[in-house]
């Protein structure tokens, strides 16, 4: 990212003169290019010693040599300690995104479970984003699926409401959740505030991993209920205890409690994977794989250190009192922004010992407010967790490399097939979906050199085109897409693909000409006479010449992949829009799921949303649903 610094002298950087004036105090350095752009941000306990290592006569890796050759200036910021330098470094990396730093692409906020403390009958809810509301937040969870699994358990065991506030306030009789024993009916006062508060307290204890304490407390209540001859209450408490026992048997490792994040790192062929395993209350609640961008030769220890800094310290804030000049002195104040910081677990278990581990512990402790443990030497159950994370990291990096190499080969073949000067870096494909003109939806899918880039996918609900007019729908979608990209000065694709023949290509050419965009190669992919896969024709928009590629062509497979993905994304959006318009249940669209099965599913789960949150195994527990049918239902409800 360009900085505010003016361009420096184009003469070779005089490292000896610079180092002669450099301090030996801790701080952060920013390496600048001739244009004043920040190339690399680093921290050091001793700035002079660290920077001198870049300008030694031998022993530098090739990528580090490339960095040094581009340096035309270095800006220093002195800090009071190495810990403060670490926090400032992470803030600058996140803000500037220097090309030679290890960059963690995943910057999305993770989901939490939220329970309000201002409501008489609080709901237990999925939450993502800033944590500004008053109440308890539990998490973060690795995925929305992990949150929904936990919410489903809490609803089954403790019968706590999960409905929205507007729904809760307007009830005059209990909803279906109450009838199937998934809610205690607080909306119509079927439970006292005191008893509901007990259920909420037990739910929070469950999320804190205190299952045994809950079971002991419920067991005592069950005994008292039995002694009082309140056998109905005793039976309810017994069922809760059984459910908790089942959860422990399925998810809990005996004798192990507490929270921890396990990080396993694997590096191969210039790519890296960090597999993150999340443990809450002794239970493995999920995992996530990260693929950081590597620009310099990096060891596992360096990568883990950089990842921990960027991931766990991203919400840490430093208030600076800086003076102008090459060396800036300040007294930072370390704080944590509760709206953005990821909670730091009490324990981090690593596959390799991280660099600067003492500094990391100090910084993480400052943000968390409590001492944390960072270790790579564990035994027992924690060792098993680490082995599991390491196995996943190694497998995923191999899959990642294989997939990347395969995709790269297909891009090269596409370059050769089209006679391009270089392989395309970005492609976009459009498709139209509707039912006799009803609920028309256009899709735009994006591929880069890593394959599908789903974060850039877009759908367009077609409003202005005449129903059933595919050409008009394509024109509207393309106009809306590229008018926005040009207005925002955003990245344009190298190749635009439309699913269709010459008519669709004509619409694309007209739109791009109207917007004065002439840098995009436009292709059409049309089914052949037999409309069989592998016999498609590729049509060049400039000449309308047709190119028929061999059925084993990697270029054809790449175009088929992006076309099929655009079709899938469009038809899914169309079905969702049509179902919403008709008020139709998503279950009605699943072949083989008739009225009886829909009734049994709704009776078992309480609603379509709950079915969507269920696993294949849970769906198969419904009496009328086989394992094969459960897989079909799950696949249909998770097409996105």
Image (tube, rainbow, N blue to C red):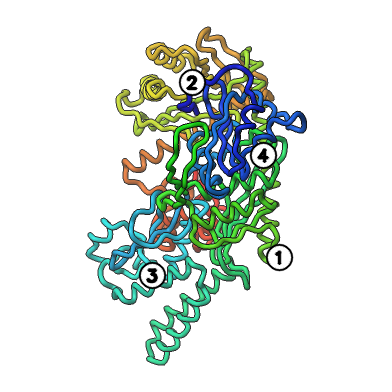
Q: Nearer the viewer, mark 1 or mark 4?
A: 4
The residue carrying mark 1 is: 379
- Say the numbered circle drawn on residue 200: 3
Q: Tell me if residue 303 can be seen.
A: yes
- Say the numbered circle drawn on residue 49: 4
Q: Is residue 313 left or right of residue 483?
A: right
Q: Tell me if residue 497 can be seen.
A: no
Q: CA distance from mark 1 to mark 2?
A: 60 Å
Please provide percent x and percent y for residue 273. Answer: 64, 43
Q: Say if 359 sits above or below 522 in the image.
A: below
The residue carrying mark 2 is: 500
Q: CA distance from mark 4 to mark 3?
A: 56 Å
Report crowding for label 4: few under 14, some 14 to 19, many 20 or more residues within 10 A (C-alpha). some
- Closer to the chain start, of discs 1 and 4, is 4
- Closer to the chain start, of discs 2 and 4, is 4
- Closer to the chain start, of discs 2 and 3, is 3
Q: Mark 3 falls on what kind of element?
A: helix
Please provide percent x and percent y for residue 104. Answer: 56, 41
- Say the numbered circle drawn on residue 199: none
Q: CA distance from mark 2 to mark 4?
A: 62 Å
Q: Nearer the viewer, mark 3 or mark 1?
A: 1
């Amino acid at each position: 990212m360009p900085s505010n610094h003016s361009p420096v002298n184009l003469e070779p950087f005089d490292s000896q003169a610079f180092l002669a004036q450099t301090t030996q105090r801790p701080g952060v350095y920013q390496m600048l290019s001739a244009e004043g752009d920040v190339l690399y941000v680093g921290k050091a306990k001793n700035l002079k010693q660290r920077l001198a290592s870049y300008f030694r006569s031998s022993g530098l890796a090739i990528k580090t040599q490339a960095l040094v050759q581009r340096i035309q200036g270095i800006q220093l910021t002195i800090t009071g300690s190495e810990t403060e330098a670490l926090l400032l470094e992470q803030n600058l990396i996140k803000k500037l995104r220097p090309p030679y730093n290890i960059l963690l692409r995943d910057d999305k906020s993770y989901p939490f479970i939220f329970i309000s403390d201002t409501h008489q009958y609080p709901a237990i809810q999925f939450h993502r984003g800033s944590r500004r509301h008053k109440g308890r937040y539990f998490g973060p969870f690795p995925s929305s699926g992990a949150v929904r699994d936990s919410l489903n358990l809490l609803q089954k065991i403790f019968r706590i409401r999960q409905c929205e506030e507007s729904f809760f306030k307007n009830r005059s009789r209990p909803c279906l959740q109450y009838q199937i024993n998934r809610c205690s009916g607080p909306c119509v006062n079927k439970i006292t505030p005191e008893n509901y508060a007990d259920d909420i307290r037990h739910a929070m204890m469950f999320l804190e991993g205190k299952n045994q304490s809950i079971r002991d407390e419920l067991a005592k209540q069950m005994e008292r209920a039995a002694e009082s001859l309140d056998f109905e209450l005793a039976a309810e408490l017994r069922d809760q205890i059984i459910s908790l026992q089942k959860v422990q048997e399925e998810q809990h490792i005996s004798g192990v409690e507490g929270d921890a994040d396990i990080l396993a790192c694997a590096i191969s062929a210039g790519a890296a994977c960090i597999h993150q395993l999340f443990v809450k209350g002794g239970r493995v609640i999920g995992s996530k794989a990260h693929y950081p961008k590597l620009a310099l030769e990096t060891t596992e220890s360096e990568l883990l250190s950089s990842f921990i800094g960027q991931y766990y310290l991203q919400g840490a804030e430093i208030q600076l009192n800086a003076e102008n000049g090459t060396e800036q002195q300040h007294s930072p104040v370390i704080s944590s922004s509760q709206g953005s910081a990821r909670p730091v677990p009490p324990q981090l278990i690593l596959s390799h010992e991280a660099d600067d581990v003492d500094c990391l512990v100090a910084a993480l402790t400052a943000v968390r407010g409590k001492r944390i443990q960072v270790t790579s030497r564990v035994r027992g159950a924690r060792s098993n967790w680490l082995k599991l994370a390491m196995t996943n990291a190694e497998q995923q990096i191999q899959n990642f490399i294989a997939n990347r190499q395969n995709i790269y080969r297909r891009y090269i073949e596409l370059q050769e097939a089209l006679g391009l000067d270089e392989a395309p870096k970005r492609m976009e494909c459009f498709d139209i979906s509707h039912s006799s003109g009803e609920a028309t939806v256009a899709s735009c899918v994006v591929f880069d050199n890593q394959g599908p880039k789903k974060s850039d996918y877009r759908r367009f609900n077609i409003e202005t085109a005449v129903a059933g007019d595919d050409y008009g729908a394509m024109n509207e979608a393309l106009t809306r897409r590229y008018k926005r990209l040009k207005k925002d000065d955003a990245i344009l694709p190298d190749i635009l693909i439309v699913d269709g023949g010459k008519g669709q290509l004509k619409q694309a050419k007209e739109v791009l000409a109207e917007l004065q965009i002439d840098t995009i190669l436009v292709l059409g992919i049309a089914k052949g006479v037999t409309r069989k896969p592998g016999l498609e024709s590729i049509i060049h928009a400039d000449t309308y010449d047709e190119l028929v590629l061999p059925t084993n062509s990697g270029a054809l497979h790449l175009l088929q992949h992006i076309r099929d993905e655009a079709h899938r994304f469009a038809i899914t959006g169309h079905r969702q829009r049509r179902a919403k318009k008709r008020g139709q249940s998503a279950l009605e669209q699943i072949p083989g799921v008739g009225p009886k099965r829909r009734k049994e599913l709704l009776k078992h789960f309480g609603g379509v949303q709950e079915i969507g949150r269920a696993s294949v195994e849970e769906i198969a527990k419904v009496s009328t649903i086989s394992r094969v049918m459960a897989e079909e239902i799950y696949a249909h409800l998770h097409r996105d």
